[in-house]
Amino acid sequence: MALPADRAVRPALSKLCSQCSTFTARQSRQGAAFLQSAHQRSVSSIRGAQSSSSPSTQVGGITRTISRPTQASITSKLPSVAAQSRTKASSSTSFATNEDLAGSGIPSKPILEQDNLFHSFTNSPIPKIRQRAAFIRQHASCPHHSHRPGQFSETNRQVDTESGSQPPKHVDFECPDCGIPVYCSEQHWMDDYEKHLEICDTLRQINEDDHDLHSGRHFYEFNYAGPQMDDAMVNMTNWDTFMYTRQFEAVNDDRCMRQATRLLTYPLTIGSVLHELSPYHIRNRLTVEGLKSLTALRYTLHPPKTGGNESIKGLRPEAPPVRVFILGARAESSLPRDAWVQLAHLFPLSRLHLIFIGPESMMNRDDEFPLPPRTPENPYGAVVEDRVWPTMKISTIVDYYHTIHKTGYFAPHDPYFDCFVLFHPGLGHPASSHEWEETLPMLLETKAPIIATGYTQADMERDVEWVNKKAKGEFDILMEPGENIFRSLRWDLNDLDPQDVSAGNWGVWAFRGKRYEATVKDNVIAV
C-alpha cells in the first residue's frame, strides 16, 4: 500500500524523467518512513533514514549526479554549517521527540546559547576548537620584537631585527579578552598590549563566530531565496539592498549576517561584476576597456525575450552556456550548491556552466571519491553535476589549467561566452607565484575577462604588482583594484599567524589580455 506522502507527489512525478521520478519517489518514501519511525520513537529507523545518500549514474565515464550533493560539502573554515544549511521545508517540520533526537546523535537543544559563545580556544567546550588551539600553539610564532624573525609573516609586519636577541618561540599565552593564543608569555603580551588592542576586538569576534558555528542552533540565514520575479529588479548597492530585493528572510542579527555572507560572497562577487545592474560602472572603478569586455558578456547573460514556448512553433535557437572558469579552486568548490544557485537566479534567461579547475578542487568532497576514470569521452576525469539547476551545470577537474589549455580541450574561447575567476589566487605570494607563471600568458591569450580577488588590500596589491611585472604592456585593466562591495563580513584567522586577520574576497579587480586594434610596422615612413 502506498504511503500518503507517496500519493501526494505522484502528479508531480509524472512530469519528470524516469531517473528523477524514481529518485524522488524513493526520497519521499524514505521521508515518510522517517516520520513514522520518529512517531514510534524508533532510534534505529531514524539513523537509517538519515544515512540515505544521493545516487549517481555514470555515462561515458562522466559522473552525473541525480540530485544536489549533500549539505556536508562546505568550506573548511565553516565546518559545522553543513548540518544546518537545509531547505525551509526540512528545517521547519520535525516530529521527532527529544529522546529520538538524542538517540540519533542530533542534539535536542543548542550546545551553546547565544549569550555564552565566548570561550578561550584552549578551554573550549568544542573539541575541534581545542584542536585548533593546539595547532596554533605548535605552528604560530610570537610576534614580540625581542624575537628574531624565524619564518615568513603573512602580515608583512615591520620587525626590528636589530633588537631581536631571543630565538623564535611559539605562542603559548592566550589573551583573556579574545581567548586566542597570541604571545609566548604574559610578559610579552603586556609589552605589546597597545599594539594587540588594534585587533583584539576582531579576534574576539572571530572567537565567538567560530563557537556560534558549533553551537548547534538552527541557521535560518542559510535558507536562501528562490527565483526572482520577472518584474522585480535587483538592487546591488550593498548586502542589505540585495537581500531585501531578492526577498531573503530578514537577517536582523549581525552575527547571522556575517555567517551568511561568508558563503554568499563567492557567487555574489561574480554576479556583482557581470550583472547589468552592477554597482561597478564607468564612474565607479570600471575602465573603458572594462566596459567593452563586460558589455559583451552582459549581452549574452541578459538576452531579450524571444516569445518562445514549448510548442513546435515556439522553438527558438538558444545561445550556448556562459562558461565561468574558476581556477585554483579550493574551498569554493565545496560550497552548498544552493549558494551557487543564487548566481543562476541573477541570470534566469541564460545558461551557466561553472568549471572548477585546480589540484585542490575536490577539497572537502571526500564523499565523491574515487574520481571518475579518465576515458576518451572524459579525458580529465571531470566530476559533472548537470542537475544543480535547470540553467546551471557544474564541472570539477582536478588538474592545472595550463595542462588542459595546451590540449585545446576548452578551445575556442569567446569573450562573449567565457570568463575566468581567481578567488584569492596568491599570484604574487612567494609560495604560490611559480604555479601561475605558466598559466598567466595562456589566460591573457584568450582575451576573456579575468576577475581576481584578494584577502586583504596588501594581498591584492601584491597580485597586481606581480601581474604588471610578468606581463607589463600585455594586459588591460578592466576594473580598478578596490574593496569588494560583496566581500565577506566575517573575519577569518590565519592559524599560522594569529596577528593576520582577513576577510574572504575583501578586494576585487579585473583584467584581460590586450587587444590590438591595429599594428604599425617600425619601417613605415610617414609622408
Image (spheres, helix red, strand yellow):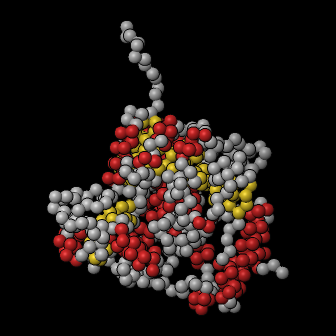
Whether residue 312 is visible here, answered yes or no, is: yes
Percent x, y of residue 442: 50, 39
In the depicted view, which residue is nearer to us: 373 or 498? 373
Residue at the far right in the pictured view: 1
Q: Is residue 230 above or below residue 258?
A: above
Q: Is residue 94 above or below residue 524?
A: below
For the point 36% across and 68% down, the residue is 139
Percent x, y of residue 356: 56, 53
For the point 19% across and 58% down, the residue is 161
Quadrant where the C terminus lies? top left
Residue at the far left in the pictured view: 163
Percent x, y of residue 17: 77, 60
For the point 56% across and 66% down, the residue is 73
For the point 48% across and 84% down, the residue is 110
Quadrant where the N terminus lies? bottom right
Q: Is residue 159 above or below residue 45?
A: above
Residue at the far top in the pictured view: 527
Classify residue 122 by image quadrant.
bottom left
Percent x, y of residue 177: 28, 77
In the depicted view, which residue is nearer to us: 424 or 508? 424
In the depicted view, which residue is nearer to us: 477 or 333? 333
> Horizontally, is 293 left or right of 428 in the view?
right
> Horizontally, is 217 left or right of 167 in the view?
right
> Horizontally, is 453 left or right of 179 in the view?
right
